[in-house]
Structure formats: C-alpha cells, structure tokens
C-alpha cells in the first residue's frame, strides 16, 4: 500500500521561506560564499515561479 505524503503549495512555500531565512543567516557570517549565494538564488526562484 502506497501513501502519498505530498505537501500543499502553502506548506512548500513555508519550507522554502524557512530555508531562505537560514541561508540568509549563514550569509551574514560568510557573505562571499558563492555556493550559498547560488542556493539562495535557486530557492528565491522557486518562490517567484508561482
């Protein structure tokens, strides 16, 4: 038996916003971290796609 454990759009957006807040905090410590900046851009684009 397979059970769908998907998220609603609102839950997904909440997760993305939470992740972005953690990324932004990490960028305060290391503002020139290219990988964090790339990750922030990716997550930000996920919010803008809606």
Image (tube, rainbow, N blue to C red):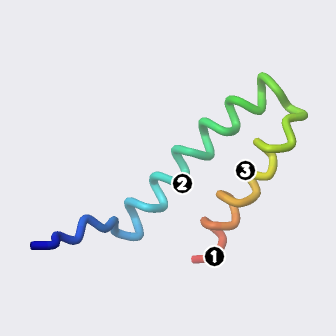
Q: What whole-number distance in Å separates the C-alpha atoms at marks 1 and 2?
A: 12 Å
Q: Mark 2 points at which residue?
A: 16
Are circles 1 and 2 on residues that touch, CB within 8 Å? no
As drawn, the residue found furthest toward the front would be: 1
In the displayed structure image, the side of residue 34 where residue 8 appears, left or right? left
Q: What whole-number distance in Å separates the C-alpha atoms at marks 3 and 2?
A: 10 Å
Say if 3 sits above or below 26 in the image. Answer: below
Are circles 3 and 1 on residues that touch, CB within 8 Å? no
- Secondary element under disc 2, as helix, strand or loop, is helix
Q: How many labels does the image show?
A: 3
| Residue closer to the observer: 48 or 38 | 38
As drawn, the residue found furthest toward the bottom would be: 50
Residue 48, image quadrant: bottom right
Say if 36 sits above or below 41 in the image. Answer: above
Between discs 3 and 1, the one toward the N terminus: 3
Q: Which residue is drawn at 9% across and 73% down?
A: 1
Are circles 3 and 2 on residues that touch, CB within 8 Å? no
Q: Residue at x 67, y 39 (%)?
A: 23
Q: What whole-number distance in Å separates the C-alpha atoms at marks 3 and 1?
A: 14 Å
Residue 29, image quadrant: top right
In the displayed structure image, the side of residue 45 where residue 18 appears, left or right? left
- Identify the disc placed on residue 49: 1
x and y percent of residue 35 in the render?
80, 44
x and y percent of residue 18 in the render?
52, 44
In the displayed structure image, the side of residue 33 where residue 4 appears, left or right? left
Q: In which quarter of the image is the C terminus?
A: bottom right
- Identify the disc placed on residue 40: 3
Q: Which residue is drawn at 55% across and 50% down?
A: 17
- Secondary element under disc 3, as helix, strand or loop, is helix
């Amino acid at each position: 038996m397979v059970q769908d454990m998907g998220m609603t759009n609102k839950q997904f957006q909440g997760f993305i916003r939470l992740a972005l807040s953690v990324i932004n905090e990490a960028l305060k410590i290391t503002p020139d971290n290219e990988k964090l900046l790339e990750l922030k851009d990716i997550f930000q684009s996920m919010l803008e796609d809606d």
